[in-house]
Image (cartoon, grey):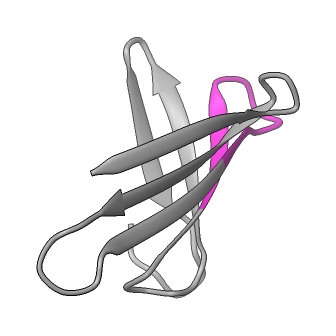
Amino acid sequence: MIVHVTSLLEGGGQVERIQVSGAGAPYVGFAVRVPSNASGRWLMLYANSVRETFARLEGRIEADRVTWDSVTPGSHS
């Protein structure tokens, strides 16, 4: 597994690329995470080589844990 994370706008968010190699084509995922206007909340747009469409997730930070919930229209959390 290879994970590459880069900061955006001097800490204003992150871009992440993940690749998992194995039998067949590798799994590749791409995410952009930025803080939301709401305190302690984040927004993430994520796509991968399996789904090939972007999913929208909202995250909340609680102590040492971040929880992400899908808010993509037509999806289930």
Q: Which residues are magenta?
A: 33-45
- The residue positioned farthest toward the left in the image shown: 23
Which residue is rendered at x = 11% and y = 80% of the image? 23
Picture residue at 41% right of the left edge, 12% below the top: 63
Measuring from the top left, give residue 71's x and y in whole percent.
56, 66
| Left or right, residue 21 beside residue 62 | left
The answer to whether 69 is drawn above or below residue 28 in the figure is above
Seen in the picture, residue 21 relative to 18 is either above or below; the reply is: below
Q: Is residue 11 left or right of residue 22?
A: right
Quarter residue 26 falls in: bottom left
Closer to the camera, 2 or 35?
Answer: 2
What residue is shown at x 32% (from left), y 73% (from top)?
Answer: 27
Query: Is residue 7 found left or right of 60 in the rendered image?
Result: right
Whether the magenta-drawn stretch holds residue 37 is answered as yes
What is the chief secondary structure element of the magenta stretch? strand
Reply yes or no: does residue 16 show up in magenta. Answer: no
Where does the image place residue 33, in percent across and percent down from the top left? Answer: 65, 45
The picture places residue 64, in percent across and down from the top left corner, at 37, 14
Looking at the image, residue 48 lies above or below residue 33: below
Q: Residue at x 57, y 85 (%)?
A: 53
